[in-house]
Image: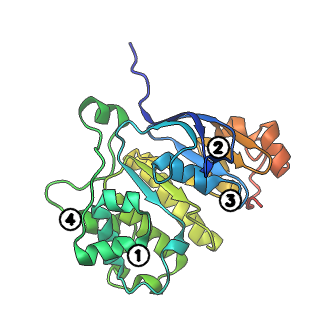
Amino acid sequence: MSMSPLAILEARGLEVGYGGQAILPPLDLRIEASQTWAVLGRNGGGKSTLLRTLVGSQRPVRGAVNRHGTALAYVPQRHSADAFLPARVIDVVAAGRDSGWSFLVPDVLLDVMRVFTGRGGHHHRALDGDDAERAGATWSSHDGRDPVAEAIAEAALDSVRYARFSELSEGQKQRALIARALVSSPRLIVLDEPTSAMDILSEDAIFELLEHLRRDHRMTLLIATHQLRFLDRFATHALLVDKDTGALEAGTAETLGSSAAFERHYGRSSRTSESRGGALS
């Protein structure tokens, strides 16, 4: 008898919003190991609100999210990592050692403050035993090796490990935030618009790094993005989110990319035609 795929995260009748008012229709969602989910939608359409609710930093209006004890890492938009931060790359990455703190307060400034003050937090239970075998291996440090050094190497930041975070390119900053997430050995990484304000080469490099983590380390990814190229090239599944039109649809990338809802929002399917290489407006 074959073993059913492991659910990394599930939502049932989930409604997200503020002040008890839902901004999107109810959502049923099942995310499994080694999937890559693209969360698509306009600016202000509810993507960030949905991500924060799924990872637990914002309460749902109604419904429930079951994370199955999965170790999570949340990478917020880079504007939360202010350019004036007097921190080095190694300091930012080391802040990821405390997954509880960085998860509950997804703000790089507070993470860096924790490094210097020694403030602690709780940690999420990682999968183990049969669950770990079903989920597949993930990135982690073994045999006493330094997890911060390994994360920096994984993100190709060795040459700038002692540089100030504020002096990095946008692509390097995003790599540092991804390395910070890796230090906590997550099985699910949630990223909010990781390639905003990047040139196309830097953007592609970030997408390739994320695909490497999924393919070679069997991580699961949930990524809010405006880029159709990410849906075309890397996503296995997708969510379409738009509070203004009441759209909230989930499915495989092929199914959603050729759906009527997708075409109403973006003109034509990105999975049934040649990649346009454009951004969602």
CB-based contact (under 8 Å), mark 3 and mark 2: no
Q: Earlier in the sequence, mark 3 or mark 2?
A: 3
Q: Which residue is mark 4?
A: 146
Q: How far apart in space, not on screen, are marks 3 and 4 (Cα)?
A: 35 Å
The quarter of the rendered structure image containing the C terminus is bottom right
Q: Which residue is mark 2?
A: 239
**Please, what is the three-letter code of the amino acid marked with disc 1?**
Leu
Q: Which class describes the residues within 10 Å of circle 2: few (<14), some (14-19), or many (20+)?
A: many
CB-based contact (under 8 Å), mark 1 and mark 4: no
Q: Which residue is mark 1?
A: 109
Residue 258 at x, y = what percent? 77, 38
Residue at 56% in and 53% down: 223
Q: How far apart in space, not on screen, are marks 3 and 1 (Cα)?
A: 26 Å
191 left or right of 46 in image:
left
**Please, what is the three-letter code of the amino acid marked with disc 3?**
His
Q: Earlier in the sequence, mark 1 or mark 4?
A: 1
Element type where label 4 sits in the image: loop
7 left or right of 200 in image:
left
Element type where label 3 sits in the image: loop
**Please, what is the three-letter code of the amino acid marked with disc 2?**
Leu
Residue 222 in view (yes/no)? no
